[in-house]
Structures are given as structure tokens and as C-alpha cells.
């Protein structure tokens, strides 16, 4: 596994633990549909939230949350649409970003309704 993949996996684990501590249930991790992947799908009450996790060891080139571009957002929406129909979800949906800065200790920021 490459260092980039290790960093991403570590960030996703931190994000999942962070969201669980905030009362979310983890429904799926690394959900794939075609070329698209959703890092985390979480639920709280009647809300299903599709979460993109961005992890960086340094913010020298920008904050992690700034790296979700339009093409990636389209892929996330496409995969989310597939998940919603495949699971007959009837509640609310939202698209969030969790930004993980690998400082000591790591800093985690949750941006609700950040992808639209």
C-alpha cells in the first residue's frame, strides 16, 4: 500500500471515529459504483449523509476541504444516486466533507452540506 493510500485510510478511520462520537451510524465505507467512490455513508435519524474525507499531512498547498472539484462531486452524486435507489432510501440526504489535518494531535473539521 502506498504512503498516499495509508494516509487516506488513516484519515478515513479518524473521520469514522469522529462521526461515530457525534452520534452518526456508519452505514458503508468506501462504497463504489463504477468509477465513483464514496468514502463514508453515515446515518442519523432520517438523514443519510454521503461523506467525502480529505486528509492532508500538511496544509502548505491548501486545506483538505478545498480539494473536492466539480468532477469529483459529479462522481459522488452519481454513486449516491445509485445507493439511494438500490436501498430505496426515502429520507433526507446531504453531502458533507470531513477534513483531516494530520497535525499532532490530528485536527478534524466537519463541513455539513458542503457539496452541492
Image: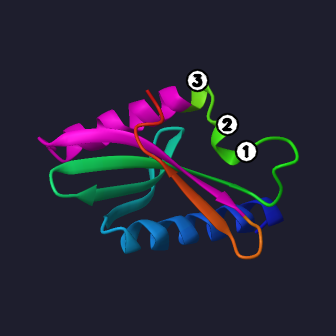
Q: Within the image, what quadrant is residue 80 found in?
A: top left
Above or below residue 29? Residue 89 is above
Left/right placement of residue 42 relative to residue 102 reads left
Q: Are marks 2 and 3 in contact (CB under 8 Å)?
A: no
Where residue 91 sits in the image (x, y, percent)?
14, 43
Where residue 94 sits in the image (x, y, percent)?
33, 40
Q: At numbered mark 3, what does the secondary structure look like: helix, strand or loop?
A: helix
- Nearest the viewer among 83 and 90 is 90
Q: Within the image, what quadrant is residue 19 found in?
A: bottom left
Query: Any magenta on residue 4?
Result: no
Res 70 label: 3
Res 63 label: 1
Q: Within the image, what quadrant is residue 85 found in?
A: top left
The residue segment tinted magenta is 73-101
Q: At numbered mark 1, what does the secondary structure look like: helix, strand or loop?
A: loop
Above or below residue 92? Residue 21 is below
Work out which quarter of the rendered image holds the C terminus and state it: top left
Q: Of callouts 3 and 1, which one flags the residue occurring earlier in the amino acid sequence?
A: 1
Disc 2 target residue:
66
Q: Are marks 1 and 2 in contact (CB under 8 Å)?
A: yes
Using the numbered discs, state the Cα–Cα distance from disc 2 to disc 3 in whole angstroms.
11 Å
Amino acid at each position: 500500500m502506498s504512503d498516499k493510500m495509508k494516509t487516506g485510510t488513516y484519515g478515513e478511520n479518524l473521520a469514522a471515529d469522529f462521526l461515530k462520537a457525534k452520534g452518526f451510524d456508519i452505514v458503508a465505507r468506501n462504497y463504489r459504483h463504477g468509477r465513483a467512490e464514496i468514502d463514508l455513508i453515515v446515518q442519523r435519524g432520517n438523514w443519510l449523509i454521503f461523506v467525502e474525507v480529505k486528509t492532508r499531512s500538511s496544509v502548505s498547498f491548501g486545506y483538505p476541504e478545498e480539494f473536492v472539484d466539480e468532477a469529483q462531486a459529479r462522481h459522488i452524486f452519481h454513486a449516491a444516486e445509485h445507493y439511494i435507489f438500490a436501498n430505496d432510501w426515502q429520507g433526507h440526504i446531504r453531502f458533507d466533507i470531513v477534513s483531516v489535518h494530520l497535525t499532532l494531535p490530528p485536527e478534524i473539521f466537519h463541513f455539513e452540506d458542503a457539496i452541492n
